[in-house]
Image: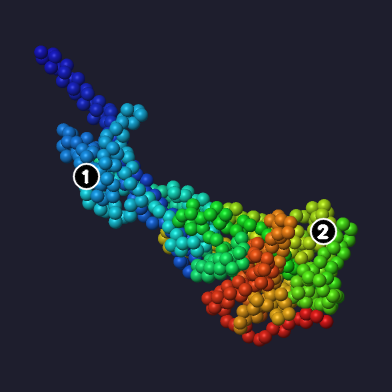
Amino acid sequence: MLAVLLVVTLVFAGRLVQLQAVDSAPLAAAALGTRLRTDTIAAERGSITDRTGEVLAESVERRDITADPSLFTGPTKERPKALTPEQGAAELAPVLGMSEAELVPLLTPKTTASGNPSMYVMLAKGFTPAQWRDVIAVGVPGVRGVKTELRTYPAGITAGNLVGYVGADGTPLAGLELAEDSVLTGTDGEESYERGRNGERIPLGDSSTTPPVDGEDVRLTLDADLQYYAQSAAKAQAEKTQAAWVAVTVMTKTGEVLAMAESGSIDPADPGATPEAERHNRSLEDVFEPGSTGKVITAAAAIEQGLATPDMQLTVPDSIRLPGRAGTIHDSHSHAPEKLTLAGVLAESSNVGTIMVGQQLTPQQRYDYLRAFGLGEKQLGLPGETRGILTTPDDWKVDARTPYNVLFGQGYAVNALQAAQVYATIANGGVRIPPHVIAGTTDDSGAFTPAEQPAGTRVVSEATARQVTSMLEGVVSSEGTGQNAAVPGFRVAGKTGTSQDLPASTPGNPEYTASFTGMAPADDPQLIVSVTVQHPDYAYHYGGTAAAPVFADVMQYALAQQGIRPSGAAADLVPLSW
């Protein structure tokens, strides 16, 4: 018996040595592993604001309510206070807004496919912090609130097509939400802690926390009030003219986009409720031939090359026969030969007069100036943005008419933002600064970092830009096609545009794009407004009728809202005829 006791004692002693000395670390780690729980601490997605700090998109805290069904066994020796599924359902139903019948199956213990007890079930989603505190107060063991976030859009549809939206799972799907996702998205943290048999946290147990790094806020150059006003004006004009859509762009001469509005805008909080045709940014994604608003490029190029002056004298018939297979180009209406200056050609929007001046430019020069003004390239680099349509002089050889069409705004296509930035270049003294919508970012410490602004590129001389601006003032005079674009108290320079949208036209039922783009005050240009009216009723198909009034309305509001003072001296207009 002594020998047996000695052997048993040695076995126990050896086992104790093994457990406490040899295997203590692995066993302790294994035990800790069964008690240790690691939760992700979600980083908060950054906000998107306008230039004044008004929130356009932000994330708010929400809680998803989960439970551990393995804890709802009813009283046991190990857990004498454990609740049954029925008892747990009775406690939770009032605070979760669910019926007991819904909760009992969710709380009933079950096993996974591998035969292990299931320890997770989702009970409810999207609870506010206040609602989660009510759940905590009930004190049911094993119920947790997983921190999540809900993306909200306080400004509603204002700038919705530009801001974009996220999916139900928070995945960015469109607009700036998608383009700036790497900036808006932070880095998740995590928290590890020991929990007891009933799922409760052990107060003095091991724990560690890696805090999350929230995403940065993105501040835009956009002005929310101006954006709202421009959207309202676009929508009203679309209804009045029965147009397919209307786009209004407002920007500074240095490329800051203050508004990018369309008659139809998406609600980022409920994108599915918006018709698919309006679920994108037409100002960047749709293209159209600019028509006569493109004549400003021809005029600027001819003056810059020393081939023309604003007061050069031209005798302009109502049609012109072009070389070879190019055919004949007509003005918009029949007229006897007119004695016009180049300023008069712009004021009356004569295709024939523009060709008479522009054909002195070589095809390569025509193409180079179109490119220099930013056509044929993306401006913002946002999802879905088009670079427009601009073929090369080699391609023009296939169609003998294209080298002449491009002189008066046909034969190539632009989006609304490109149309605006051509005039911004003239307003900026001939220096093109690419448009931009990002003003900067703010990190989670509150430090603001301005966005790197693109460098300017000189397209034409300052003298040429001044001369073109002076000629464009004649367009808005009583003798020009843009009389409806006048703004009381301010000198305005701009150009009407009317082009037939061939792809959308059917025999006997042509469709048109009517537009007006201009700047004010003309004596010291600060703001550029571009209006595009796509497929209006024929009674409104001219740019001076459909687009110019919207320009005047939005420009007048923008000048006042931005605190820009009225013009001083009256315009000294270049003679329109001789």
Residue drawn at 65 percent across, 65 percent down: 537
Q: What secondary structure is found at the residue carrying circle 2? A: loop
Looking at the image, the residue that sits furthest to the bottom is 569
- Image-quadrant location for residue 233: bottom right
Image: 52 above or below 565: above
Q: Is residue 148 visible?
A: yes
Residue 106: numbered disc: none
Position of the N terminus by quadrant: top left
- Image-quadrant location for residue 340: bottom right
Q: Report crowding for label 2: few under 14, some 14 to 19, many 20 or more residues within 10 A (C-alpha).
A: some
Question: Taking 504 as reference, is 339 left or right?
Answer: right
Residue 90: numbered disc: 1
Residue drawn at 29 percent across, 56 percent down: 130
Task: Indicate the position of residue 16 as horizontal and vertical percent values.
Answer: 21, 26
Task: Indicate the position of residue 467 as horizontal and vertical percent values.
Answer: 74, 76
Task: Indicate the position of residue 435 as horizontal and vertical percent values.
Answer: 61, 64
Q: Is residue 147 visible?
A: no
Under mark 2, the amino acid is Arg
Under mark 1, the amino acid is Ala
Question: Taking 502 as reference, is 147 left or right?
Answer: left
The answer to whether mark 2 and mark 1 are in CB contact below 8 A is no
Q: What secondary structure is found at the residue carrying circle 1? A: helix
Q: Report crowding for label 1: few under 14, some 14 to 19, many 20 or more residues within 10 A (C-alpha).
A: some
Mark 2 sits on what residue? Answer: 401
Task: Indicate the position of residue 122 as horizontal and vertical percent values.
Answer: 33, 42
Position of the C terminus by quadrant: bottom right
Which of 375 and 152 lies nearest the eye of the viewer? 152
Residue drawn at 27 percent across, 53 percent down: 133
